[in-house]
Image: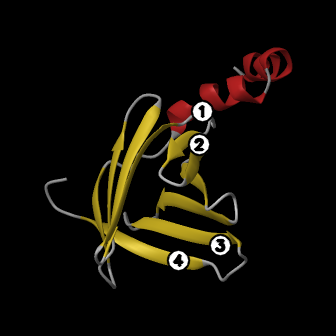
Amino acid sequence: MRLTTWLAAFCLGPAAVSLAIAGNHAELNGIWKASEGSETISIHQKEDAVQIAETAGKESNAIECNTTGQACKIKGGEVTLWYNGDTLVMMQTTHGNSRVVKKRLKISTDGKLEEEIIHISPAGSTEKLSLVRQSGS
């Protein structure tokens, strides 16, 4: 297995290794509600794509994108999704690349969805949210 991974990395590049490892990602499917505040995230994972719908107050945002690291067009910009081990990473650029936000989604040891929001441009403080899976999802 290790030799196969190294051969894939050498012969086919990082994309092949990413695809080989992608099967090890966490089960993020469901509807998640923030412990504090009004944010809700709905996640539907497919074999090679993810659908994410976020609602915070009156604002809502929905995307569907592959998880191979290729950019997908969204209103006003683009988004890129990939797995880094058990973490789903989302890089979103909008407003002509003047606004860049990176989000990391992963399951904590207590079963909650941990969302880390990193404001890259303009630079800002990192936010961390804890969301609870809603029953029946």
Between the residue at mark 4 and the residue at mark 3, the CA separation in whole angstroms equals 12 Å
> Mark 2 and mark 1: span between their CA atoms?
6 Å
Residue 82 is tagged as 2
Q: Earlier in the sequence, mark 1 or mark 3?
A: 1
Q: Label 1 near label 2: C-beta < 8 Å?
A: yes
Colouring scheme applied when the structure was drawn: secondary structure
* Tag 2 and tag 3, C-beta contact below 8 Å: no
Mark 4 or 3 closer to N-term? 3
Instruction: State if disc 4 and disc 1 touch (CB < 8 Å).
Output: no
Give above or below for 106 relative to 122. above
In the depicted structure, whether residue 60 falls above or below residue 84: below
Question: Please, what is the three-letter code of the amino acid marked with disc 1?
Answer: Thr
- Report the front residue among 67 and 17: 67
**Quadrant in which residue 130 is drawn:** bottom left
Residue 96 image point, x, y percent: 67, 58
Along the viewing direction, whichever of 52 and 97 lies nearer the viewer: 97
Graded by Cα atoms within 10 Å as few (under 14), some (14 to 19) or many (20 or more), the crowding at tag 2 reads: many
| 10 to the left or right of 97 | right
- Which residue: 73% across, 77% down? 123
Q: Secondary structure at mark 3?
A: strand
Tell me which label, 2 or 4, sits earlier in the chain: 2
Which label sits on residue 128?
4
Tell us which disc is closer to us: 4 or 3: 3
Can you identify the residue that label 3 sits on? 119
Label located before the other in sequence (2 or 3): 2
Q: Is residue 77 left or right of residue 111?
A: right
